[in-house]
Amino acid sequence: MGIGPSTKETSLHHFRDPLLDVVGEDKDVDLVGVIVLGTPQDNKYKTFVGQRTAAWLEAMRVDGVILSSDGWGNSHVDYANTFEEIGKRDIPTVGVTFNGVQAKFVVTNEYMNTIVDINKSEEGIETEVVGENNTNEIDAKKALAFLKLKMRNHSK
């Protein structure tokens, strides 16, 4: 449980990542970088990954984050932890992940209040069509719009 054919990002998707294209081309934001992190098996490392990522973002003094996940189920445990660690540092964050009807979050927290669901199937389920439920340009534009709004409200 967590990553299936339709939520698995292919190599081509990584080379043409819509989030990077949309955020990188936007004149209102400064794309600082991309952090790639895994989903450890051991719970102590799950916590460590979220803490380390948030500390890194804080050290870079970012104004906002788009936190993307290409998995669900157990992957959402790490996702929620990373959201919480970033939120504790008062950094506006928007999530992009697969939810649909079958992949509702197994854990949540107060910081997970803005999520772009990348489900594309009419049934709201993970399918056997490779790449069907991946982030596309519309999802990326939504995430960026939400992030800009959160950053603007945060600065007031």
Image (cartoon, grey):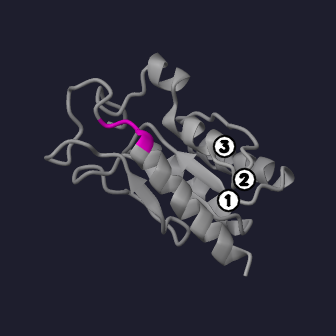
Identity of the residue drawn at 42% across and 27% down: 9
N-term mark: 2 or 3? 3
N-term mark: 2 or 1? 2
Q: Position of residue 12 (x, y in %)?
A: 46, 18
Vertical side of 84 occupied by 43: above or below: above
Vertical side of 110 occupied by 25: above or below: above
> Which residue is the site of mark 3?
49
Along the viewing direction, whichever of 93 and 155 lies nearer the viewer: 155
- Where is residue 6, by image quadrant? top left
Which quarter of the image is occupied by the N terminus?
Answer: top left
Q: Is residue 80 visible?
A: no
Left or right of 40 on screen, residue 7: left
The residue tagged with tag 3: helix, strand or loop?
helix
Whole-number angstrom distance, CA of label 2 to CA of label 3 = 9 Å
The residue tagged with tag 2: helix, strand or loop?
helix
Examine the residues drawn in magenta and state their main secondary structure.
loop
Three-letter amino acid code at the position of disc 1: Ile
Left or right of 136 on screen, residue 152: right
N-term mark: 3 or 1? 3
> Which residue is the site of mark 2?
54
> Which residue is the site of mark 1?
86
Vertical side of 115 occupied by 52: above or below: above
Q: Is residue 71 visible?
A: yes
Q: Which residues are magenta?
A: 133-137
Identity of the residue drawn at 69% across and 46% down: 48
Left or right of 77 on screen, residue 21: right
Q: CB of mark 2 within 8 Å of CB of mark 1?
A: yes
Along the viewing direction, whichever of 30 and 116 lies nearer the viewer: 30
Crowd band around label 3 with a 10 angstrom C-alpha radius: few (<14), some (14–19), many (20+): many
Which quarter of the image is occupied by the C terminus?
Answer: bottom right
Identity of the residue drawn at 56% across and 42% down: 22
